Image (cartoon, rainbow, N blue to C red):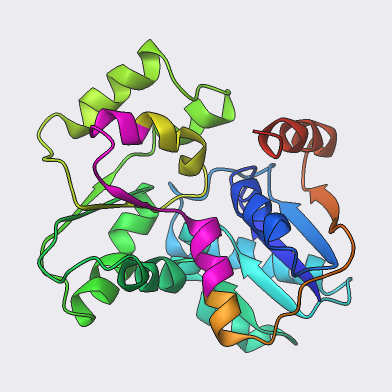
């Protein structure tokens, strides 16, 4: 099975890492819109337009499925992309929500969602959780984490100060939804901040489980090939991939 993965920048590589580890896919075509990252501060119409332009890029490849690793794209552009696509386009929000049941998170357990401004403002996570009966939900914008991860800051004083800024009035949750693909890179620091107590919901792990349940996947006998493309500085993105995929 040959699939595409689309992200606004480098963050979707955390999803790629889980996809490669699953051994289901013969080839992954990754496209990061690095010229226009981040999407999380942009308006809905701009996000949809950029996403449909990315869809045109993937039409140059014979893929079976496209994953929008970017939570912001999944929140705003998934329906439009599916309407114009020749293949299924799958987002990471639904799979992340469904992962709570897989981890036996109870309906009255506290759930903290952290994501970009656009993803939180869309209410996609909040509404989906409420529809499933979860009633103790906190959602906060933590956009400063994105450039920190891009800079390779995965721990240390600066990250600690930023977590204190965002979480100083937040009680330790039962589950922490990492609503941005950058955030798995700081998952160890986030877990330590909350005393290793919350169940962390990771977009990459969640989407693999979702695909296992909804598509006929078979393990490959050979190593997954990864091709990386970008709208700007593709060599820089490939260098980031070497580092992140080896973590």
Q: Position of residue 34 (x, y in %)?
A: 68, 42
Pick whichever, 37 or 147, lies toward us: 147
Residues 106 and 45: in front is: 106
Q: At 63% from the left edge and 78% from the top edge, which residue is drawn?
A: 89
Does the magenta-highlighted stretch encompass residue 192? yes
Q: Position of residue 107 (x, y in %)?
A: 15, 71
Tell me: residue 31, above or below residue 58. Answer: above
Image quarter of residue 80 = bottom right
Q: Quadrant of the C terminus?
A: top right
Write down the quadrant of residue 232 in the picture.
top right
> Would residue 187 appear left or right of 78 to someone viewing this image?
left
In screen coordinates, is 127 left or right of 48?
Answer: left
* Picture quadrant of residue 76: bottom left
The residue shown at (60%, 54%) is 15
The residue positioned 13% from the left and 39% from the top of the image is: 170
The N terminus sits in image quarter: bottom right
Q: Is residue 11 magenta?
A: no
Residue 56 picture location, percent across and down:
78, 71
Q: Is residue 44 above or below residue 149?
A: below
**Residue 82, image x and y in percent?**
61, 84
Mark count: 0
- Tell me if residue 100 comes above or below residue 179 in the rendering: below
Residue pictured at 23% horizontal, 32% vertical: 195
Which contiguous range is marked in magenta?
Answer: 190-209
């Amino acid at each position: 099975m040959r699939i595409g993965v689309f992200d606004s920048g480098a963050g979707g590589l955390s999803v790629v890492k889980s996809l490669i580890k699953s051994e289901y896919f013969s080839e992954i075509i990754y496209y990061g819109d690095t010229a226009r990252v981040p999407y999380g501060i942009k308006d809905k119409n701009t996000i949809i337009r950029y996403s449909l332009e990315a869809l045109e890029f993937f039409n140059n490849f014979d893929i079976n499925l496209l994953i929008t690793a970017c939570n912001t794209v999944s929140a705003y552009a998934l329906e439009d992309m599916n309407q114009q696509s020749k293949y299924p386009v799958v987002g990471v929000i639904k799979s992340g929500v469904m992962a709570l049941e897989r981890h036996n998170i109870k309906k009255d357990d506290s759930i903290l969602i952290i994501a970009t401004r656009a993803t939180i403002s869309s209410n996609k996570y909040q509404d989906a959780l409420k529809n499933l009966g979860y009633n103790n939900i906190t959602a906060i914008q933590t956009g400063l984490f994105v450039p920190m991860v891009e800079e390779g800051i995965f721990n240390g004083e600066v990250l600690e100060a930023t977590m204190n800024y965002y979480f100083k009035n937040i009680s330790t949750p039962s589950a922490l939804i990492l609503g941005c693909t950058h955030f798995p890179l700081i998952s160890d620091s986030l877990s330590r901040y909350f005393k290793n107590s919350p169940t962390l919901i990771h977009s990459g792990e969640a989407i693999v489980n979702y695909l296992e349940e909804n598509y006929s996947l078979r393990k490959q006998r050979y190593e997954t090939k990864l091709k990386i493309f970008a709208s700007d500085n593709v060599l820089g993105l490939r260098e980031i991939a070497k580092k992140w995929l080896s973590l």
